[in-house]
Image: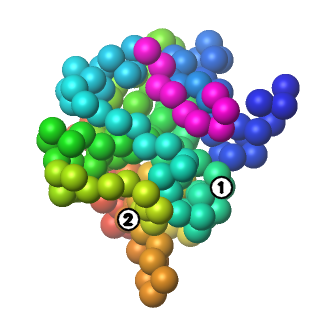
Amino acid sequence: MLAIKFLIICGLAIFAAPKGPSLFQMKNGEMFLSKPLKQQILSKHQDFELLQTKQFSKAAIKNSKGHPMAITGDFNGDGVKDLAFSGVSRKDKKFYYYAAISQKGKKSYELKIVSHHSIEPKQKFSDMGTYLTLGDSKIIKASRDTVQIETDTQQLMTVEPYYFSRKNKGFKPFKGKMD
């Protein structure tokens, strides 16, 4: 029961409900992808590494409510929680933001890229200031949950909201209107 309260306080939900598939689990405050989701990611990027809390700055951990590497929300508007998470593939030289989009009434999901950025081959990931948060639908006037990529530096904070396009079945930058 304590673990359930911890996850809810940190903004993550447990996906064991019959409405959707189990996408991750928490152990000792760190997140691990479910075996099917991990296999699907590794089939695309053999060296994919899920980022963990210890790799983020204290500000990123605080601003993301404790879990800067992942968020849950209903990104496609079907009433089932989806998962967005971040990780890196050194072979591809890219930092990825992915979302596992659950499908109502099914125990399956579609893996979608939210965004990606190039990295240096030997770039270290520590004290990171870029993290995921759930978009505030009241502020951005969105009809469903959005994935926000926030970067916090000492001088500037940037917010990049993305929404799941029902028309294109993928993520697009949010610019005031959803399709």
Above or below — where is 40 with respect to 65?
above
Check contact, mark 1 vs mark 2: CB within 8 A.
no
- Residue 24 shown left or right of residue 178 in the figure: right
Where residue 37 appears, as percent x and y from the top left, is 39, 21
Q: To which residue does mark 2 refer? A: 160
Q: To which residue does mark 1 refer? A: 65
Above or below — where is 149 with respect to 13?
below
* First-in-chain label (1 vs 2): 1
Badge 1 marks a residue whose secondary structure is: loop
Residue at horizontal 51 percent and vertical 17 percent from the top: 21
Badge 2 marks a residue whose secondary structure is: strand
Q: Which residues are magenta?
A: 27-35
Where residue 71 appears, as percent x and y from the top left, is 53, 44
- Corner quadrant of residue 137: bottom right
Q: Nearer the viewer, mark 1 or mark 2?
A: 1
Colour logic: rainbow
Can residue 20 be seen in the rendering of this structure? Answer: no
Depth order, front residue of 52/108: 52
Residue at horizontal 48 percent and vertical 12 percent from the top: 107
Q: In the rendered structure, does residue 34 fall within the stretch colored magenta?
A: yes
- Residue 10 shown left or right of residue 175 in the figure: right
- Corner quadrant of residue 36: top left
Q: In the rendered structure, does residue 95 fall within the stretch colored magenta?
A: no
Can residue 129 be seen in the rendering of this structure? Answer: yes
Residue at horizontal 21 percent and vertical 48 percent from the top: 94
